[in-house]
Image (cartoon, coloured by chain):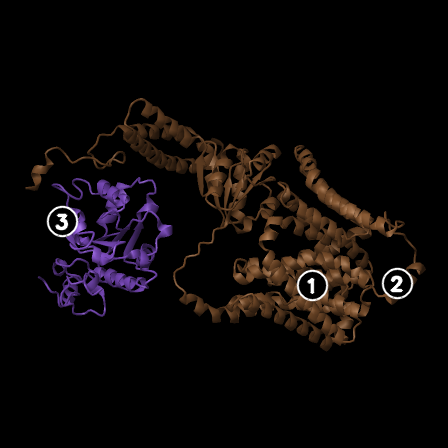
Amino acid sequence: MASPTNHLSSERVQQTPSKKRILLLFAHPSMHRSEANRPLFHKAQDFDFVTAVDLYAEYPTFEINIEREQQRLLSHDVVIFQFPFYWYSTPSILKEWQDLVLEYNFAYGQNGTALHGKTFICAITAGGKEDAYRAQGYNHFTVRELLQPLEQTAMLTGMHYLPPFALFASRSAAEQHRLAQHLECWSTLLTALHNDDIDPALTSELVTINDLLLPSKSLPTDAMDKGDS
Amino acid sequence: MTAYFIQAFIYLAAAVIAVPLAKKLGLGSVLGYLIAGVIIGPVWGIVGEETVTIQHFAEFGVVMMLFLVGLELQPQMLWQMRNRLLGLGGLQVGLTCLLISCAAFAFNQPLSVALAIGLIFSLSSTAIVLQTFNEKGLTKTEGGNNAFSVLLMQDIAVIPMLAFMPMLAMPELVEAAKGLEQAAEHHEELSLVAGLPTWGYALAILGSITGVIVLGHFLSRPLFHYVASSGLREIFVAMALLLVIGIAALMSLVGLSPALGTFLAGVVLANSEFRHELESNIEPFKGLLLGLFFITVGASIDFAVLSENVALILGLTLGVMLLKAGVLWLLAIIFKIADSNRWLFALSLAQAGEFGFVLLSFTLQHHVIPPPIITILQLVVAISMFLTPLLFIFYEKFVVPRHQKAADEQAFDEIVEQGKVIIAGIGRFGQIVNRLLVANGVKTVVLDYEVGQVENLRKVNIKSYFGDATRPELLHTAGIEDASMLVVAIDNKEAAKELVHYVKHTYPKVTVLARAFDKGHSYELRHAGADETVNETYHSALQLGVVAMKDLGIHPFYVEQKRQTFVKVEQEASEELFQKWLTGSDGQKFDPSYRKLFMQLESNIKEAMQRERGDKHDSGERGWTPPPKGYEDGFD
């Protein structure tokens, strides 16, 4: 079991000084009711290295412009899917987006190398508590396990997969004043991705990427242990 | 005749020069008129004696103003605001009046004079305050909202005040006036009620008021309808004037205040479909007459009195303003108006208002206050109004920055201020737009020039107004200044184009959406400045085409994809055609090269529709294209 002692590796920065551009594909079909995703999305818009796309706003009738979306992928180094976790998967427009944009000979197939070497990560908000997402909980699987179709998609298309950035029990996050810290972590994550500070190899055992981002936890003894939150 | 022309010229010239200048300096139009009057009167002395005669005539502007105030007051709105109106507004008028009366009493004024002074200074300047709020974007703030309720209450309170003033008349002043009148030519006022006993008088008054309400409610509609259906605008203007003048005449005949009568008529008509049209017709008359009134007030200011009593007048002004602001501050605490809003509320309403002038000239006529005191009070009212812009500057420079920090810390609660939408034309097209918007809680103001259409819509509870939306005054009364959008759906092609052009150039912030009849019209509308156009038949025709294809047995989802492709290619084509159209000269917007391009693009659409799957550089069908057969072997 890997135990990353220095998770925000400073070495990598020196190796690749070029800054990464981030494409944030955001899907929330009910923005006016959103409590967690909306501030997350707005926060991301503040960074000039993030291209924040509200898919439901841009394609309200699901008429996704394949050409435009592929150009966006080509001009960014990091792809983030930001969405509320619906039935252990993405809202439908993100599935539509995958079905349409990840074409043969673009994303996969003999000449499909457009995404090779990019980084992929999901930023999700889940209604259930963190305890529910494990073998003993009522959801039986961790969020990382449930997101395996996307992990495999990243693998097939040659992207580095990072464990999801997750907010659990999202319906009560605002009332319990957990949003501020989550937003703080979100900024840290986006900046780290931009600076290419995260080594995918060190995250392969993590369920979520959250623990890497908390300023207080500089030395997590076991990244898998989430019982304390 | 020549003398009249010269007089009219002097008054108009003074107004035309002074008012825009005053507005530019942030003083507002009321002060502009006053300054104009001061310049042509006391300063240059080009006008003199006739000002008093003109003032009586100009007071009719006040009557019109109250008619317009009435028109703005829909009974439901008043009911919704009742707490703030009666609580906040009522207490403001009552407390201020009481305190100022006491002060005046302490200065050895008789009780009736003190009371009249209290009433006069309890009012603030609706004209200056609302205009400044608009200019500085403060209308929607909490302070602005509350100030508005107080001003509204004051406007309403003017009516009983006008009725009440004559009862305060001082016998010795009346006597003195009578003596003068007998010395001069004696003239009898026309009156229906002169010889009646008290009960008959009461009956006549009651009858007239009931008459105004009942006739206003039942007779006005068919009458307006009849006049409007003639389609002659000037007759409608005549009709509107007839209404106001007629009611004023009736009220004078039974010895009531004409202002009261027109105000009532205004309230009765506030819900009528002719409201905006009436407003836009009366508005210019009212504006000019009121302007004239303020000029005469300015012209009759006695500077000798000012220079003799500088200390007294300045002292009184400061005293009145401090007292008014104090009362407002207290009310703000009671009604929990906090922080910068409390400052705004207290500062904005601390002056005396234009109704103060009206009441002052009224008290002069009815011998309530001795003339020397009136001269001094007029100066106090005027100076307090002059100081108001300074108070707003104080608010912006010192109050806002201090409260800004606190406001900044309250983070992300997005308040999307959604302005209303004006819909011009409520025929087949505009109706559907309106239904969708209203069903989603968007505020709309619907205008149409077809009386029958407006009537039909009113029957099914769609709030609409009779009026020609292509007229700037009507757009103004419908509130185009603070509307966020205009939907143009009128049937006249040319007029639609002009309307788009006018609104886009006069109010660039207003989004303009327009219904186009055909492609050519849509280009013209876009050229005129429309932000978006939709061809009236395009989408419904396409929908019928979709139904046809489905009925022919083609898979519905495949048909849907084809529809989307069609729209996409058509949109690109249309854009190209538009650019081409723009370069074409006026006479030949559909010249041969345009026609050639059109045919070319038509064949492009066809080609895009028939393109084979698998070619990923097509702009046509791309979605859900399966990978080629046997591709799975390549992965091992």
Q: Amino acid at mark 3?
A: Met
**In front here: B365 or B283?**
B365
Callout 2 and callout 1 share a chain:
yes
User: Tag 3: Cα neighbours inside 10 Å, few (<14), some, or many (≥20)?
Assistant: some
| Residue at the disc numbered 2 | B177
Residue B74 visible somewhere in the drawing: no
The mark that comes first in sequence, 2 or 1, is 1
Which residue occupies the extreme right position in the image? Answer: B183
Q: Amino acid at mark 2?
A: Ala
Residue B281: image x %, image y %? 67, 44
**Which chain is tinted purple?**
A
**Left or right: B449, with A167 as reference point:** right
Distance CA(mark 3)–CA(mark 2): 103 Å
Identify the residue position indicated by label 3 in the image.
A155
x, y percent for residue B183: 94, 60
The residue where tag 1 is placed is: B35
Cα gap from disc 3 to disc 1, whole angstroms: 79 Å
